[in-house]
Image (spheres, rainbow, N blue to C red):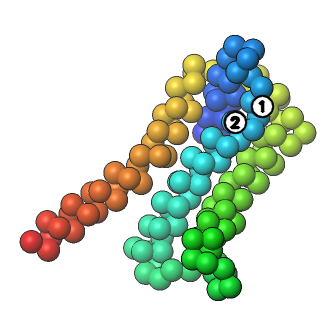
Amino acid sequence: MWVYYRIWMDFIHRVKLQPVANRRNWKLRCMISMTLAMAFNLVLVMTILEKFVFKRYFYKIEFPYLPVRVNNVLSYLILFILPCALMNYLLIFRNDRYEKLLNKYPYYNGKLFISYFLISMFLPIILMWAGIVFSKINSA
């Protein structure tokens, strides 16, 4: 849990040091960025668990009365975005908890957050490409 708080506090520190014009809606911007990164990580973990550990798909919601694209978007929002956003709100923003945590955790000039964010965004893509390449190598 300490890694989670360190990344968050590094990010909040960085955003709060931005010029005044960029500080509007900083909470929303932080929440969206971190929730997106966490959702990508959750998708990766669930995909690995479903495909390689349990060998069956169990983490899904289907809305048969909706078109496929709407069903997919709604499922993604409910299964991946909502849990991450709720966790972030409860652990960071509820009762302005971040104010107490800012003094507890050091500032790394935003490097912790940017590393976490970039890894979260690109690791699934890199793993997918590696899977495609290795599957073609094995089938050849």
Any part of residue 79 in sight: no
Badge 1 crowding class, 10 Å Cα cut-off, few under 14, some 14 to 19, many 20 or more, is few
What is the x, y in percent for residue 137?
14, 66
Hey, which residue is sitting farthest front in the picture?
Answer: 67
SS for dot 2: helix
Q: Amino acid at mark 2?
A: Arg
Q: Quadrant of the C terminus?
A: bottom left
Q: Quadrant of the N terminus?
A: top right
Q: Amino acid at mark 1?
A: Asn
Between 65 and 32, the one nearer to me in the picture: 65
Quadrant of the image occupied by residue 48:
bottom left
What is the x, y in percent for residue 3?
60, 39
Number of on-image labels: 2
Look at the picture and state if 129 lies above or below 63.
above
Look at the picture and state if 32 lies above or below 20.
below
Q: Which residue is mark 1?
A: 25
Residue name at image x 72 percent, y 52 percent: 85
Residue name at image x 57 percent, y 46 percent: 37
> Badges 1 and 2: C-beta atoms under 8 Å apart?
yes
What is the x, y in percent for residue 59?
59, 75
SS for dot 1: loop
Give how far apart the Cα atoms at labels 1 and 2 are: 6 Å
Quadrant of the image occupied by residue 109:
top right
Residue name at image x 86 percent, y 43 percent: 94
